[in-house]
Image: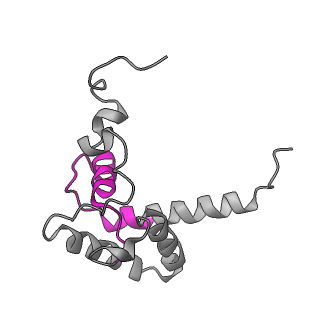
Amino acid sequence: MSPPPGPPPTGSPESMAPPELRDGPPPAGSPPAPPPPGARGRDVAVLAGAVLARPDLWWTALGELRRMAPRLWWRSPPHLPLPDRRLWEFRMVTAYGRPDAVPARADVVSFLEWCRAASASSASRPAGRG
């Protein structure tokens, strides 16, 4: 059964996604959208400041950066493994209600601690389901 035609209901996860993500991912091989001027530097500064203050989270942060970086990130400017702008804005909308929000340092640390705990939890589970 297919969903009814028309826009998704207000408040649904689909209606909260940026318009370009509602219609599915961009075509394969298309370069990531450029960030708005100054936005990436501000976000990177907050994230780096939160992570640098917590050496115990450095490996977790690198793992999460690797997971969020677009494939073949080194082929397009700025030649850094930064998340796609559309993904970042969607994450900020779901967390803070605005695509231009800047994550709080405490939220960055909490997220990374959660990732580390989830990773440790999944690593300790047996491979089979019994």
Residue 118 pos. (x, y %)? 60, 58
Q: Which residues are magenta?
A: 80-109
- Pick the quarter of the image with the C terminus: top right
Q: Which residue does the image show at 32% across and 59% down from the upper left?
A: 30
Residue 9 visible in the shown view? yes
Left or right of residue 61, residue 130 in this image:
right
Residue 27 lies, with reference to residue 119, above or below; the image says above
Left or right of residue 12, residue 101 in this image:
left
Q: Which residue does the image show at 35% across and 51% down from the upper left?
A: 27
Residue furthest out toward the right:
130
Residue 113 lies, with reference to residue 89, above or below; the image says below
Q: Nearer the viewer, residue 72 or 126?
A: 72
Residue 88 quadrant: bottom left
Residue 79 pos. (x, y %)? 32, 78
Residue 111 quadrant: bottom left
Residue 87 lies, with reference to residue 41, above or below; the image says above
- Examine the structure image and report whether residue 12 is included in the region drawn in magenta: no
Residue 85 quadrant: bottom left
- Examine the structure image and report whether residue 98 is included in the region drawn in magenta: yes
Left or right of residue 6, residue 124 in this image:
right
Q: Nearer the viewer, residue 68 or 117?
A: 68
Residue 127 lies, with reference to residue 97, above or below; the image says below
Q: Which residue does the image show at 23% across and 70% down from the upper left?
A: 40
Residue 72 pos. (x, y %)? 42, 70
Q: Which residue does the image show at 30% across and 41% down from the upper left?
A: 17
Residue 127 pos. (x, y %)? 80, 55
